[in-house]
Amino acid sequence: MKENSNVHFVCNADRAGVLAPFVVMEDDRVRVTATLVPHGPIFPAFTFRFDTDYGSVTLSGDTTYWQNLLRLAGQTDLLIHEAVNLEGAQLPDAFRSHVIESDVEVQKVGAIAEAAGAQRLVVSHMADLANGTIDPNRWRRWARMGYSGDVVIGSDLQHLDLTKRKGRP
């Protein structure tokens, strides 16, 4: 995991806390690990990582910025991260605060992927609270902010390949 001054952690630490990843299940084909992440008033909320001979996939779940996710996602092949656009959105203060405590702005998700050392970033579970619709080109530009890897804007039933590799980390 790389240090990145562009990633700021804001959340209710009393709820998610700092927690090392733990194994959920493991067999000869896959190891699933998880950790707690903050999602506003919802508790518990988890992020999951799947390690296979084909690579690793980390799914952020619904969360705001939190070091547990970075620790779990360290050097993942594919980080699937939820995102929301608030830029230009006219929202009541209470709703804006809830979104910031529960989700990551698309303009900041790239810095999270970079800090985790993710090889690829897939932006998924998206909401544009300013425009109502997702413009994939705009979202890709936003997600690339602070990120040097490949960015994919997710779509329903999308298929992404992982490269077969020897062993698991």
Image: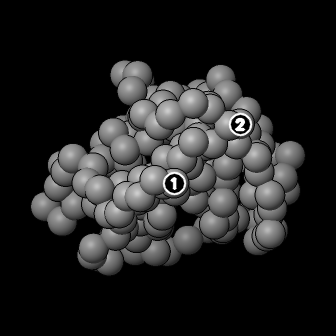
Q: Which mark is residue 79?
A: none
Residue at 41% in and 58% down: 27
Which quarter shows the N terminus?
top left
Q: Which residue is mark 1?
A: 29
Q: Nearer the viewer, mark 2 or mark 1?
A: 1
> In this view of the protein, which residue sits in the foreground, 97 or 2?
2
167 relative to 25 in the view: left or right? right
| Residue found at the very far front of the displayed protein | 28
Left or right, 104 with reference to 126? left
Looking at numbered disc 1 in the image, what kind of residue is underneath it? Arg
Q: 8 above or below 138?
A: above
**Left or right position of 10 against 12:** right
**SS state under label 2:** loop
Residue at image location 57% in from the left, 59% down from the top: 82
Q: Residue at x 37, y 22 (%)?
A: 3
Amino acid at dot 2: Thr
Disc 2: which residue: 163
Q: Position of residue 159 (x, y in %)?
A: 80, 58
Along the line of sight, which residue is nearer the eye, 119 or 166?
166
Label 1's element? loop
Q: Dot 1: within a 10 Å radius of its alpha carbon, few (fewer than 14), some, or many (20 or more) residues? A: few
Please tell me how crowded label 2 is: few (under 14), some (14-19), or many (20+) other residues with Cα within 10 Å.
Answer: few
Determine the image quadrant of residue 165. top right
Total number of numbered labels?
2
Residue 36 in percent (x, y) is at 28, 60
